[in-house]
Amino acid sequence: MPARGRREARDGQRGDRLRGGAAAVPQRAQQAPAEGAGREVRRAAVAGSGGGSRRRGSVLAAGLALTLAVSGCSLLADRTKPDETLTLLTDALSRGDLSGVPITPETQPEAARLPAVLEQLDGLRPHVTFTTTTVDQGRTRSRGVLEYTWQVRPDSEPWRYATDVELVKNAETDWQVVWTPAALAPGLGEGEVLDTRRADAARADVLGADDEPLVTMRDVERVGLDKSQVRPEQQERSARRLAELLEIDADNFVAAVEANGEQAFVEGLVVRASEVQTVSRLRRSIGDIPGARLVPDTRPLAPSRDFARPVLGVAGPATQEVIEASDGDLAPGDFAGLSGLQARYDDQLRGTPGVQVVAEPAEGEGEEQGGGGQGGEAEEEVLFVLPAEDGTPLRLTLDERAQLVADSILVDQDTPAGLVAIQPSTGDILAVSSSPAADGFSTATQGQYPPGSTFKIVTALALMRTGMTPDDAVECSRTVTVDGREFTNYDDYPASALGRVSLERAFAHSCNTALARLHERVGENGLQTAAKTLGINTDADLGYPFTLGTVPPAESETEQAAMMFGQGRITTNALGIATVAASVAAGQRVTPNLLAEGAENPEKVAEPLTGAEQEGLKRLMRAVTTEGSGRFLQSLEGEPVYSKTGTAEYGEEDPPKTHGWMVAFQGDIAVAVFVEGGESGSGSAGPLLEEFLAEWR
C-alpha cells in the first residue's frame, strides 16, 4: 500500500477510535466521578490535537460539548452547596445589606433596595436563620426556608415568621438567590418599604385612699402664641406682651418662640379649666395680642396646683433628656413624670406603647401609581401588631380631703414649713404637705432639723426604762450647769412649775433643766434605743424619699444633756415626729407608709413598746393638753387630744434663732407641724395643727 494510503487508513482508524471514544463518554460520565469525566475530556482533547480533517474537528467538538453537558451539574454540585449561599444570605439579612450575596441578575435591582426598605426602622434588624433546603432532581433549583426573629420592643414577645426563598444555578454559575420582597416579609411587595407605627399607651392615674383619683387627666387651657397667626416682625412684641400677662419670664418665652418652627404653637402657661374666672380673664385680655390663643387640652393633674406637690411631683410634656433616657418608650408630645413620685414611678404609670410594622410604598411610589386610598394617599398593610400596654395606677395612702386642708393651711407660710398626718392603726400617711416657701423641697419628709422639746417624748420613754414613772419627782430650776455649760428653760416658763415637781408636770410645761440633770441616768444608748422603738433613727426603703431622723451617740457630757430636750446633733422632720406620736397612739412602732402596698419597716425593734410604757407616755402627753403648753387644743371637739410642743434653737447668733414644732394625736390620727424660724411651738406651729385637726374630716 502506498505511504499516502497507509497514512489515510491510520487516520481513519484514529478517527474511528475518537468517534467511538466520544460515543462512550456519556455512559462513563454517568457512572464515574467528576475527576474521571475530566480525564476523558482531556484525553479527547489531546487526541483531537494531532491534526486531521474538518470532520474530525467537528466530531471532537460534539464529543466535548456532550461531555460537558452531561457532567456539568455534577461538577457544580460538588463545588458549592445551597447551604453555603443561604448562610451568606442570612448573615447579610441580619446586617441589612445583601451586597456580597450571589443574586440572580434579574432580581439584583430589588435586592439592592434592601437598605432603603429597612431605613425607616431606625436600626431595627432581624435575626435570620434557615432550617431546611430541598434540591430538585436536576440539581439546578433549591428551596430554602428563612426564619426571622425581630425584637421589635425590648422585653416583649418578638415578631417571628418564616418565608421561602428560591436558589438557582446553571453550568456557568454557583447557587444564586432569586430575591423577592416576600422573602423578607410576607405581604411586602415590590417598591414597598417597611416602617413602624406607634400606638400610645394610656397613662394611669395616681390614686389615693379608697382609690380616689388624685392625679388624673383633667381639662386645661393652654395659653400661648400661635406663630402662624402673627407676622414674623411682630412675634417678639407679642411674646413679651403675653409673658407679662401670664407673669412668666419674658426673655425665656421669647427664646422659645424664636426656637420653634414657623407654624408652631408655643405654650406659655397651662391653666385648669376649672379655674373659670382665670380662664375668662385671660380670654378677655389676650384679644389685642396678635397670635395669642387659648387651646383646650387635657393634662395629668392633681386636684389643685399645690396638692402634695413636693412629694407627688408633676407630669408634663416629656423633655428631650427624658425622651432619650426612655429607650424609645417616649416620643415628643408624650407626657412623663418630671419630678417626685410621678418621675420615680413613671415607667409604671406611662405603660408601654404599642408598635405596628407596616408595608407601605416608598416615598414617591404611591403618588406615581395613583395611591390606594382616598385623595391619592398610599395604602399601607399592617404586617405585625404589638399591642400597647396601658400604665398601672400608683396607689397611695393620701386622703384627698386631709391633703387639701393641709396644703391650704401652709400655703401662706412665708418660711419653709411641713405638716404630716398619719393614721396610727395602719401607718398610712393621710397628708404630707410642705409650704411653697421651700421652693419645691419636701420639708415635711426630707428636712433635717433639731426637734426641740417634741423629742422629750423619746426622752421620757428612755427615763421610764430606768424605772421612773410620771409621778416621780424631778428638780426643775431656772438654770442648770453641766460640764461647764449652762442650760435654761424658755423665757416665759411659768414660775409655778419650778422647783421639785413631778415628771408629769415638768413634761407638761416642757422643763429643760429637769431633763438635762438626768442625762447620766439614760446611759450611753438609752436615747438611741428609745428613738428606734418610736420610729426615729431607722433606715429603710419605703418607696418614697424620706428620712425619719438621726439620733447619734453623744460626743460629750454636755451634748448628752442637750440631747435630753432635742438639741445637740439630733435631727428629724414632721414625718419623724408624727411617727413618734403615731407609735405612742398605736402602742407599737409605726411604719409611715405613703404607698398603699408599702412594706413594714424591715429593721427590727430591739425593745418594743410595752403597754405600761404606752400608758405612761399618753399620760404625759395628755397633761400637755390639759395643763401645759397645749391647753388651747382642749377646745377641739371629739376624742381627747394628746400633744407636745417644741421650740428648737439653731445657728450661732445670740440669742439663737428658733424653729417651732407641735405634735398631737386624737383618735386614729397623729399630726406633726414644723415651722422654720417659728418663735415657739405653741405660737407658730400650734395654731396650724389646731386648724388641721378641726377641719380635716
Image (spheres, rainbow, N blue to C red):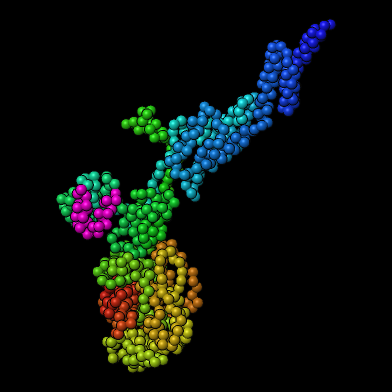
Residue 257 colored in magenta in the image: yes
Q: Position of residue 352 (x, y in %)?
A: 42, 50
* Vertical side of 226 occupied by 18: above or below: above
Q: Position of residue 47 (x, y in %)?
A: 75, 19
Q: In front here: 218 or 30?
A: 30
Q: Quadrant of the C terminus?
A: bottom left
Residue at position x 72%, y 25% from top? 38
As drawn, the residue found furthest toward the bottom would be: 499
Q: Quadrant of the N terminus?
A: top right
Q: In front here: 565 or 458?
A: 565
* Vertical side of 641 occupied by 140: above or below: above
Residue 3 colored in magenta in the image: no
Residue at position x 51%, y 38% from top? 97
| Quadrant of the image occupied by residue 458 | bottom left
Residue 7 in sight here? yes
Q: Position of residue 616 (x, y in %)?
A: 40, 82
Q: Which residues are magenta?
A: 233-260
* Vertical side of 685 occupied by 261: above or below: above
Q: Is 365 on the left-hand or right-hand side of 287? A: right
Q: Is 532 on the left-hand or right-hand side of 209? A: right
As drawn, the residue found furthest toward the top would be: 1
